[in-house]
Image (spheres, rainbow, N blue to C red):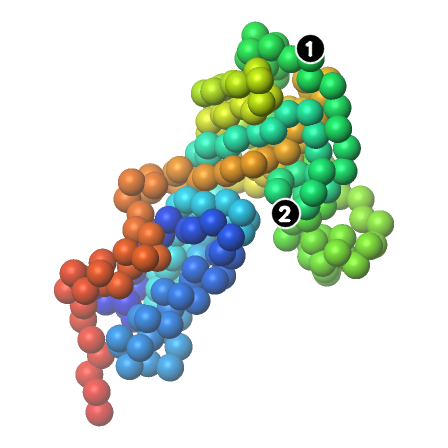
Amino acid sequence: MNFQEGEFIYINKPYRMSSFGALAYVRTRLSRLLHVKRLKTGHAGTLDPLATGVLILCTGKATKKIESLQLQDKEYTATLQLGATTPSFDKEHTVDMTYPTHHITRELIEQTLHQFEGNTMQVPPLYSAVMVDGHRAYKLARKGSDVELQAKPIRIDEIELTHFDPDTMQMSIRVACGKGTYIRSLARDIGFALGSGAFLTALCRTRLGNVRIEDCVTLDEFPAWLERQEIELPERT
């Protein structure tokens, strides 16, 4: 492998680590191995810190492929807690509102999910990296600014209910979608469509383009994975 010329590294990003944090971990070890100050690296498609799963890292000239990789279809698995909402639509913030759930059945959920398939409009989460007048929305939100985000077109190819527990009011879904789809916003919208509320308790990106989670290594596995590679080292002068 020639990391300076350009390679792709498939990482299963851990829970509570930012995508940049995962990138920095890998870049530090590659730079040390190659005896360079800072290897050129980048990642395709940011994952929230509370999400796990497929994160494609690019090195060297492969960083030119980042934009095209971000345009590729994605697949996620997610768990939703029904009957409540949080400001961030996930567990980053505590519950701010509760809603009735006695009317929610598996049949109602399955009927409701189909309305989200196809091309629709979606309002991104306020706590997201969306740019608003040159500022990140989440930074404005944390300062208490009154920000109104505009709906953007998204595409959901498949949405499937994989589990529902009527006692805990938790449900799990699998979602295949296009670029720009926020699963946190989808959770919010599903809750409202059910006449209740919902927020994410777990999220995993299981596929990005042709790269599946089975193709990825964890950060704990990365040092051993690196040792197994045939690596082209730069000539030292």
Image position of 82 with respect to 38: above or below: above
Residue at the farthest top position: 107
Q: Is residue 177 left or right of residue 133?
A: left
Residue 219 image offset from top left, x and y in percent: 35, 57
What is the spatial separation of the Cα atoms under label 2 and label 1, in whole angstroms? 27 Å
Residue ID at (46%, 34%): 76
Pick the residue in front: 15 or 38.
15
Residue ID at (49%, 61%): 20
Q: From where the camera sits, is residue 73 visible?
A: no
Badge 2 or badge 1: first in the primary sequence: 2
Residue 89 image offset from top left, x and y in percent: 66, 38
Name the amino acid type tagged 2: Glu
Q: Which residue is mark 2?
A: 92
Residue 134 image offset from top left, x and y in percent: 72, 60
Residue 237 image offset from top left, x and y in percent: 22, 92
Residue ID at (37%, 72%): 28
Pick the residue in front: 107 or 38.
107
Name the amino acid type tagged 1: His
The reply to whether the C-beta atoms of the residues labelled 2 and 1 are less than 8 Å apart is: no
**How busy is the neighbourhood of tag 2: few (under 14 within 10 Å), some, or many (20 plus)?**
some
Q: From where the camera sits, is residue 44 visible?
A: yes
**How busy is the neighbourhood of tag 1: few (under 14 within 10 Å), some, or many (20 plus)?**
few
Residue 103's disc is 1
- Check the picture and name the quadrant holding the N terminus: bottom left
Q: Is residue 206 left or right of residue 18?
A: left
Residue 74's disc is none
Pick the residue in front: 88 or 81.
81
Residue at the farthest bottom position: 237
